[in-house]
Amino acid sequence: MPETFDFDRMSLRAFMALQQDVAKAIKRRFEREIAVVFTDVVGSTAYFDRFGDAAGRSLVERHHTLLRAALAANNGRIIDTAGDGAFCVAESAFDGASALIRFQESIADDNAQMPESQTLRVRAGLHWGTALVDGDTVTGDAINFTARVAGSAEPTEIRISEAAYSRLPPELRYRCRPLPLVSLKGYAEPARLLTLAWRDPSSSPDTLVIEETGQRMILPDKEIISAGRLAQHEGRIANDLILSHPDPQLNGCISRWHFQLERTSDGLLLRQLSRGLTEVDDAPVAQGDAVSVQAGSTIRVAKVLTMRLVARSRATQAATVYPGMG
């Protein structure tokens, strides 16, 4: 027969002892390590405002449908879809990462069939941590932390915690790149996060090498990557890739915003922004035009800088060790 308690007669000491017993029982029964995933539809408020509630709901439902399919294939499930994103869990960090990669790939494929005005863009976060799990009730600081991780991500980016990275196998670690320390709202200490490339780095360029200086620039995991001479504009970062020549006179030949790289479902495009000269594999690109580029492509800017797009091999990336991580 279960023990009963007369709360009206119990002493404070008895209450405190009972509280400790309950806390231990909750931890023993419900606490477990789990992969926590958060997603967020980028620009949904503006989309609802521009196109109306029906179109906005349709965009969010596309998100939910594609996410459910990706999770179902990778031992994951949606816990809550409040707002314009989702809170999900998966059995392992590998499952969570694999689901998010598949999710972003499916979004890219789906977007290719849609008008540009209906483009779906999602930021996502992944963390491996301890939570209290009872069916569809999942609670704990790991959930709050993962929401902040996702909120810090760029559009279309997957950001993961150091704990999640430490649980990934080599075939997924090679897709990761550490970020500068990130301040997260509500947390005193900045977080060590990584970006997880959902496009296979071994099949697409991830580095731009400047032949004149030997400088190597990692391409950020963004849909649009701007490149030019200007570093700052009105207190904000002007370009993702700062193009510079050590000779001041030659440096002035490079436009402030010279070109941009655009990630598409078919690969990488270079779009010329400047009236200045840009050549791709010796062929000039007119202002406003876009041409396909790939690993091995040579980009020459204003006849003063020569750059090559490089894709590191899986072996090289898998061998990369990030100090203090995993």
Image (cartoon, grey):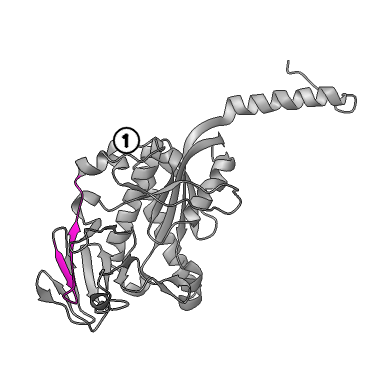
The relative height of residue 279 versus residue 39 in the rendered view (above or below) is below
Left or right of 143 on screen, residue 176? left
Q: Does the magenta stretch include residue 80?
A: no
Residue at x 32%, y 39% (from the top left corner): 321
Name the quadrant containing residue 287.
bottom left
* Residue name at image x 47 percent, y 66 percent: 57
Residue 153 position, x and y percent, is: 44, 57
- Secondary structure at badge 1 equals loop
- How packed mark 1 is, by other alpha carbons closer than 10 Å (few <14, some 14-19, many 20 or more), is few
**Residue 73 position (above or below residue 114):** above
- The magenta segment is 297-313
- Residue to which mark 1 is pinned: 169
Depth check, front residue: 92 or 271: 271
Report whether residue 219 is seen.
Answer: yes
Badge 1 amino acid:
Pro
Q: Where is residue 271 in the image (x, y as percent from the top left)?
A: 24, 74
Which quarter of the image is occupied by the N terminus? top right
Asked whether residue 299 is drawn in magenta, I would say yes
Tell me the quadrant of the picture where the C terminus can be found: top left
> Is 193 rendered above or below residue 245?
above
